[in-house]
Each structure stands twice: as C-alpha cells, then as structure tokens.
Image (spheres, helix red, strand yellow):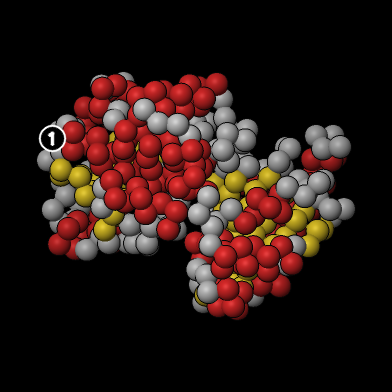
Amino acid sequence: MFEAFRKEILQYESVGIFSHIRPDGDCIGAQVAMALWLEKNGVRALAFNDHEVPASLTWLADYFPIELPEEELTAQCDAFLVVDGNAPHRFGSFEVHQHQFPRPTFMIDHHPDPVDVFDHAISVDDASSTCELVYNLIAGHDETQLDEQICKALYTGVVTDTGSFQFASVAPETMEVAAALMRHGGFRPPEVVERVFSNKSLNQLQLLSLALDSLTLYENNQIAIMTVTKGMLEKTRTRSEDCDGLVNFALNVDGVKAAVLLKDIDDQGVKLSLRSRSEVDVNEWARELGGGGHKKAAGALHPGPLDSAIHDIIKIGVKQLKRLEDEKVLP
C-alpha cells in the first residue's frame, strides 16, 4: 500500500494538498509534512485550505504556507492529495476544483468507511492519526528525510488526535512512532505541546467558563451536553476555533459515558462535536445525523434550532445506551 502510493505520487511535477475544513492538528500536521517531503523529492507542493489555520497551529504554516485554493493555483497542479478525511465534501471547495481541473486524486486518512472515489489511497481506520500514516509513508522511503520540521508537524498530529496519548486508538506502534519522531527530529515534547496547548488567552478561558455554565447531564448522568452560542462568542470576543477541546471538559465528569458540544454560532445549523468513553460509539450517533468520525470522537451538523438538536442527540444516545445495557456491555 505505502510503496505503491509513493511510486505513484512521486511521478508528478506538482501536487496540490488539501486539508479538511475547520482544520485541526492532525490535518495541518499531515499536510505540512507531506508538502515538505514531496519537495525533498523534487515534487512541487501547494497546500490549500478554505479556512484559516487555528492560532495554535500557525507556527506549522510557517514551515510551509497554506493558501486559499484559488483557481490560478489549483490549475497548476498535476494531481491532488487530500489528508485526514475520506470523503470529498470534507474538503470544502475541493470538489469544485477537481471538477474544473480533473486530476488524479490521492488520499491519506484514518477514518472508517472511506468513499471509493480516489485513484490511490492509504486508509487505515485503526491508526491513531493520519500523521502516523504519513510517518510510515516517509520512513519507508528514506528515514533521513525525517527532519526537524517534518517530525514536529507529524508529532503535532499524533499528540492532538490521541488526546495526548489518552485515547483507545493509542497502540504500542503509536508510541514507537512518537519516539521515532522525537529521535529523528531532535526535540522534546514541550517544544510542540506548549505551542499547541499552552497558549490560551483570557478570552478563551472566559468562553470555557460560559460553556461550563451550560453543562447539563442527562440519562442518569451518562450524557453530558454543553453549548456555545453566537452570543457567547461575541461576549468573550472569541471565534469558532476557540471551541476546540471544550467537549473534553464535559467528558471528564464522573459517570459520563458520552459528551456533546453543540455550537449554535451561525446560519449553517448546529455543529456537534461528540466524544465518548467505555463502549459507547458516538460515530453511530453522528451517522444518524449525516455526520461521522470514530467510535470515540465524531461530528455532525444538525439543521437546528438548538433545542431540537439537543433533543435529537439525546434521543439517539439514549437508544444506544439502552441497547448496550440490554446486551450487558455497560454496567
């Protein structure tokens, strides 16, 4: 899989790399690392995203620029690569550019149920992160190309998508990849982790306070619901990306098996971020609403209003909780 992928993608002169909209550490880390690696091997790389890079990750964009996918840029690409997503709609305007300039399309991702529209794909749904897969791709080609910037980019994706190595997706191989990245990159975790996590503004902490005030427990304290509204963002002078990670505070409540953050901040609907522990599969919840993700972390979009979104997600969650209790999977 990796060898064939490498052989195919390195034959092109110019590759446009798309990371998914509302970018996170895994997609930006994978995108930057792939761009740097392609250029080491004589392939011109262009990196695209429809949305701004979050403030906590802009230092990665200093390693390689991430631009808006303007027509004059995408037209220069001989092939396209999408990272950390396995369906074209996850990449914003990517489908428009692919339709306008049909090109061979590559995909690297670790989410389940990929759409079968890509010419070449690396898809491993039990990998901890897309960055873990990119590490294997590069290391299998030439370990000496794992320089400090590539390794820090990949470590960012691994550490963020594993919840700092707390999630069930972490396997011994994940820790071995993390160690190899530190070794090849010549850095220690704080050099990455502090840049990603230890830079919260007072405004962001005020937003956290308001979100925690909204926290409500349902179904014998097994489901935790938090909300963020447009008014809360305006009051704290924060943005949508400042909500990243808030849902994990709800999941930390004793007895909670699943937590949902509902963001009612624009006219597009209510955005849901779902997290779980134990045997609860929030990917099932998200898929009922047209979304998806992993068993322990998923997302979806509800048309709203907020009260209806809360009602529907609790109804879906209760149904699964009762089934798991009947199967004696949950205590």
Looking at the rendering, which quadrant does residue 206 occupy?
Answer: bottom right
Q: Is residue 313 above or below residue 196?
A: below
**Residue 259 visible in the displayed image:** no
Q: Which residue is mark 1?
A: 42
Q: In the image, is 4 to the left or to the right of 220?
A: left
Q: Residues within 10 Å of mark 1 (few under 14, many from 20)?
A: few
Q: In the image, is 145 to the left or to the right of 252?
A: left
Question: At numbered mark 1, what does the secondary structure look like: helix, strand or loop?
Answer: loop
Which quarter shows the N terminus? top left
**Residue 202 visible in the displayed image:** yes
Q: Residue at x 13, y 53 (%)?
A: 76
Q: Residue at x 31, y 44 (%)?
A: 32
Q: Position of residue 268 (x, y in %)?
A: 51, 72
Q: Position of residue 96 (x, y in %)?
A: 28, 61
Q: Exactly how many numbered labels are in the figure?
A: 1
Q: Position of residue 326 (x, y in %)?
A: 85, 39
Q: Residue at x 35, y 47 (%)?
A: 60
For badge 1, the amino acid type reads Gly
Q: Is residue 80 above or below residue 176?
A: below
Q: Residue at x 64, y 63 (%)?
A: 208
Q: In the image, is 101 to the left or to the right of 319?
A: left
Which quarter shows the C terminus? top right
Q: Position of residue 58 (x, y in %)?
A: 37, 54
Q: Nearer the viewer, residue 189 or 219?
A: 189
